[in-house]
Amino acid sequence: MDHHHAHSTGSRDLRMARSMCWHCQSEMAGEYFCERCVKVQPVSKDTDYFICFGLPRRLTIDQNKLEAKFYELSRAFHPDFYQNKSDAEQAISLGNSATLNTAYRTLRDPIQRAEYLLDLEAGSVKEIRTSPPSDLFEEILELQETVEAYRASDRDSETGREILAQLVAERQALDQRKQDMEHQLEQLFTDWDTLQDRGDATSQARAERDRLLKQMREILSNRTYVKNIVNDLAETIE
């Protein structure tokens, strides 16, 4: 039996780029490999990453299951197995491996996973904020003035050391704020999963779904802004 054909058994939940085999034109139903000619099939770059790993569209996932599925698919698609295959098969294995790696990196990280799910459910949330969250507006303006004062100061002077201490404290406070946002997200993730598990299609459930998505998008956006400020502060004072 072909090495790769063994991997195709039970692997019908991956959305492919084609509805038929690129090699023999047999009808495809989501298999990794054609059951007729046993050629590897291209994974669609638009595939749902959750489907790719056989996971439900949830925000709390089984990391062990994700990792196990990743290694299983990595072996199936690894370019080393295709060195003696046709150019087309080698190209497909490279493309599949790249898509798989991107999917794994995305789902492995809780924040990236949430951003990806929001992208699937309600449009992209990856835009970088150009203005601070409303409750931080004045604080950020004052912080920017302090940063400018520090850059203009004699770093070894008493004034320079005082400003540095102030910036260190500001950084710690902002980092704590970022952590608080992450705790809020964890609760929203749990609420989302609970709602999804209920499978409720009522208007009330849809309203709750939209509310959760909106809250997650807002907190993720605020977190990105605060994280960038914290990183900028770190570069300034280190």
Image (spheres, helix red, strand yellow):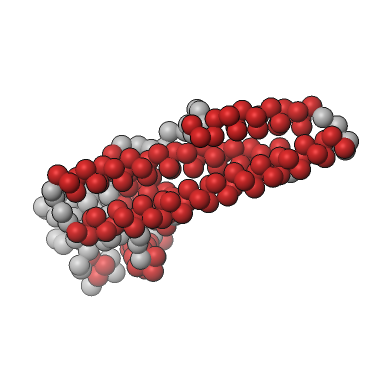
Q: Would you say residue 60 is visible in this rendering?
A: yes
> Is 4 located above or below residue 120 in the figure?
below
Q: Residue furthest bottom?
A: 1
Q: Nearer the viewer, residue 116 or 80?
A: 116
> Is 170 located above or below residue 153 in the figure?
below
> Is 74 located above or below residue 22 in the figure?
below
Instruction: Give the image location of residue 103, x and y in percent.
Output: 37, 52
Q: Quadrant of residue 148?
A: top right
Q: In the shown orientation, is residue 201 left or right of residue 166? A: left
Instruction: Give the image location of residue 63, x and y in percent.
Output: 39, 65
Q: Quadrant of residue 79?
A: bottom left
Q: Nearer the viewer, residue 81 or 53?
A: 53
Tell me which residue sits at (73%, 40%) in the image.
166
Q: Would you say residue 119 is visible in this rendering?
A: no
Tell me which residue sits at (35%, 54%) in the image.
189
The image quadrant where one finds the N terminus is bottom left
Tell me which residue sits at (25%, 70%) in the image.
6
Q: In the shown orientation, is residue 137 left or right of residue 86? A: right
**What is the tally of numbered marks visible in this picture?**
0
Q: Nearer the viewer, residue 131 or 89?
A: 131
> Is 88 located above or below residue 80 in the figure?
above
Q: Quadrant of residue 108?
A: bottom left
Instruction: Give the image location of residue 30, x and y in percent.
Output: 18, 55
The image quadrant where one finds the C terminus is top right
